[in-house]
Image (tube, coloured by chain):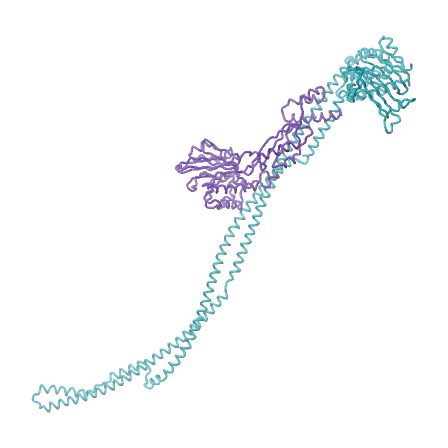
Amino acid sequence: MKFIHVADLHLGMHPDANKPWGKNRDQELWDTFERLIEKTEEEKADLLLIAGDLFHRQPMISELRQVDYLFQKLSRTKVVLIAGNHDPLTKDSAYRSFAWSDHVFFIGSDKVIPVKVGDVWVYGFSYYDSTNPNPVYDTIEIQDPSAINILLGHGGDVNHCPFQPEELAKLGFSYLAFGHIHKPDLSSTVPYGMPGSLEPLDITETGLHGYIQGEISEEGICTYSFQAFSKRSYFEEEILCEPYDTELSIRDKILDLISMEGIENIYKIHLKGHRDVDLEFDIDKLQSLGNILLVDETLLDYDFEALYQMNQDNLLGLFIRDLKDKEDELSKQALYLGTRALLTAMEGREG
Amino acid sequence: MIIKRIHLLSFGKFVDQEYDLAPGLNLIFGENEAGKSTIHTFIRGMLFGIEKQRGRGASKDTYSKYEPWENPGRYEGVMEVETERDTYLIERNFQKDHKSFRVTAQSDGHELSQEECGRFLDGLDEAAYYNTISIGQLESETDSQLASLLKNYAANLSSTKNMELDMTSALEDLGKQKRVLTRQYKDYNRQELYSEQSELNKQLNLVAQDQKEITKQQEELYQQKKREEKKLEELRQMEINQKQEEAKALTMIENFKEKNTSSRKNLGKVKLALSREQEKLTPLLNEMSRRKVTSLEDVDRLEEEESLMNVVNWPLFGLTIVSVVIFILSFFLGKNTPPIVQAGLVLLCIIFLTLFLLFLSRKKSQKDQNLRMLADLRETVKDVEKTEKRVAEGERRLAETQDAIKENDRGIEKLKAKLENQVDYQSKIQEVHERIQAKDSNNQELVWKANKTREQEGEIQARQDEIQDLLKKIENADLLKDAYDLAMNKITELSSEIRGNFGRLLNDQASKYLKAITNGKYERLIIEEDLELWVLHRDRKIPVYQLSKGTIEQIYLALRLASAKMVFEDPKPILLDDTFMSYDNKRMITTLQFLNRLGVQVLIFTCHSREKLVLDKMQLPYHYINLSE
């Protein structure tokens, strides 16, 4: 039995909404979902498991129709889905009244119940609210151990049904299909997978994003692997600025970085190191080289030790003496600002 | 630094006048107008140059004042100074069109470059010169003005001048940068941003509400549309039915019409037949009325009568029987009976029998004939009855057919009426179509609204992200502002420290000098934080403005000497210009003794002879220059 496991698609979200590349990001979430359906069909999977947070907020009926329309393109796959903490089954949720196609199974119970999907039993539950303190896993009992049993769940942190994969595996599930954490996590000791968000949703979600594909043999042995699938990835990188760097050389360093990793990806680049005192970065211009958020953390190129030695008997020297050994950011900044101001004053005077 | 020699080539009233100077005390005596200030100015000019002023003060400026009378084209001088490093020959041409300045090191004869020229005096600039070395008189000020002069002086000492300049400039710079930074974010109020964030959250909630509403409405529309579609189906079906009914009705009408046509044809035939029958009937009826028979019963009655008619002639019969009996009897009785009688009996019998039979047969045949006639009559009556029946039948059929035709006509009328009352399903269907279309366009509207909510979500999200970024930027800016404050405070703090240190050192140094100059009368000069000056006299603190002018002058001298000592590592010559004017002798003695002990080159310019007298009296070594000679 072949399955594809996704979660946390967060359709309806507008990631990076105020950034230039954010204008179409919400549509890209849908596009990738459609691509996933095509892939599922291509792979001739038997089961498509969606472990919650399909939507980022309550879906509208027209959106559910859209999703069901995409599901209808699956000729042999059965779909099982549950509601997560972002799209819970509140009392007026559109999920409640929506009639899915016959091959789509929505487990809308707030307690874990088994649902027969083809030859497989899928145990699952949905969120009724944005947090879930209920001990949903305490009362699970597998009714037919000879069949293939899969647990479809959502959660993992303190306010959202925390669980231990090892404990749940003991119950006898062939595979534990979970959602909620946006970073992919596959266990090699127990059959447990968290696919992470299908498309990364903000700068903290660096790394690969995609789905989990797996097979469960007749004896219930599960093999599975992670497949990268997202259109874009986030990268958080540092670029070192040397005192001899210029605006153009920094520009080239940035271009090298984004060409190597892919210009369609989204970057947060920290400029670190020391820059020449005359160099001021045109942040906007550099950011326009790609999908970039640029943070200038460079410091002016001052050799404080040398400056101190040369100015021991004057204001600058005393100033450096008092601040150069301080570790905190405030003092470091003050050291730079004061040194620059005093050097400018001294040069002005001597000139 | 020591000024070894001054050579006024052409300066003021001096032409080619050379004076050597000694390391220690130098007394330069000159009556008024002898040239003391010229020498003063010369020394200053040689060190720093004399610029021709422009504009209003031009005619009275220093340049013009000392421009040589006799030979204005030549305006130059030479001065030899000895510093720690080397002995230098300074040559200057003050003439504005031929300005030149040259310094030559005597050790190897090399000419100093521009840069070296700036440095060979070890930081002695014009300002420092005025503030420390060149000590004129305090002009006759009031005591308190003097005191405040002193105070200002203390504040402006040149050692910290650089520091003060740097501090001022740096603080201004930092202040400006901080202001720029503050201005950048001054329009942003954290509180406002926070409240905007919660506003935006509310708006998101409203959008979510809208979406729920849209979903609900779409559901309703969907249900309504389903109902309408069902209705449409029904109407369509009803229309089909109606059409079928219509076709049926038309067919039926056709049928009826056909039937009526054939019926009408039949009618004709029947009428024709009827009339023929009627024709046939008439003679028969006549026959019947002739026989006075009206019905079969009559015939039956007649037949019965007839059949009952006795065909037997009873008398004959009786006779016959008798004869037969007699005959028979004759047989029995008679063997005796004569055969004639027997034959006669037989003959009688036969005659009677034959008569009887003849009668019988005649009656019978008559009866038969009558019966036959009656039978014919019966037939006739039957015929009549049949015919009458037929006629009645025919008339009935006629009536029936006419009824049927009427019936059919009525049927046709009804059907036609019904066809007239056809329900206009088309327009009903059209209505339903329109309603469905209206629902579709309502749905379109809702879809459009739904898209709008997605746009709104995007916008709200964008603004929220913007606010997040802004808050972060503001936070960073605040940190940066704090850094500016820290830097500025640190600089201010250090400046005070430096000032304080310098002040303390100056204080100490000036106190030392003061004590020496006043011969212990005033042990200490106290320069307070606010630069108020006090002296300590036998454990009593006395504010300087309460002291005499002479004492204040001494304090002034002590201060300037102390600051000169502190500012210059390499001691510079002190120029005292008629300093001792307001000193009494006692003071002058102690001061001159002190100056001698000081060990720096002192140039005392005076127009009095007092100083010489004291110096001689105290046997203090000095170099004497009389400008009048």
B130 vs B24: above or below? below
Q: Is residue B619 visible?
A: yes
Disc tally is 0
Q: Nearer the viewer, residue B497 or B37?
A: B37
Task: State whether residue B297 is above or below residue B50.
Answer: below
The percent position of residue A187, horizontal first and vertical second, equals 47, 32
Name the tint of chain A in the rendering: purple
Q: Position of residue A30 (x, y in %)?
A: 54, 42
Dividing the picture into quadrants, the one containing residue A24 is: top right
Residue A220, quarter of the rendered image? top left
Q: Is residue B620 left or right of residue A6?
A: right
Q: Residue furthest left?
A: B336
The residue at the far right in this view is B70
Task: Find residue B472 and report its horizontal and vertical position in percent.
Answer: 63, 33
Relative to A302, say whether B558 is above or below: above
Answer above or below: position of B288 versus B467: below
Report whether residue A132 is seen. Answer: no
Residue nearest the viewer, comparing A23 with B579: A23
User: Which chain has been coloured cyan in this picture?
Assistant: B
- Image check: B122 left or right of A134? right
Q: Give the quarter of the figure containing the N terminus of chain B.
A: top right
Q: Quadrant of the C terminus of chain B?
A: top right
Q: Nearer the viewer, residue B569 or A84?
A: B569
Question: Looking at the picture, how far across and down is residue B166, in whole percent?
Answer: 74, 24
The answer to which of B183 and B552 lies nearer the viewer is: B183
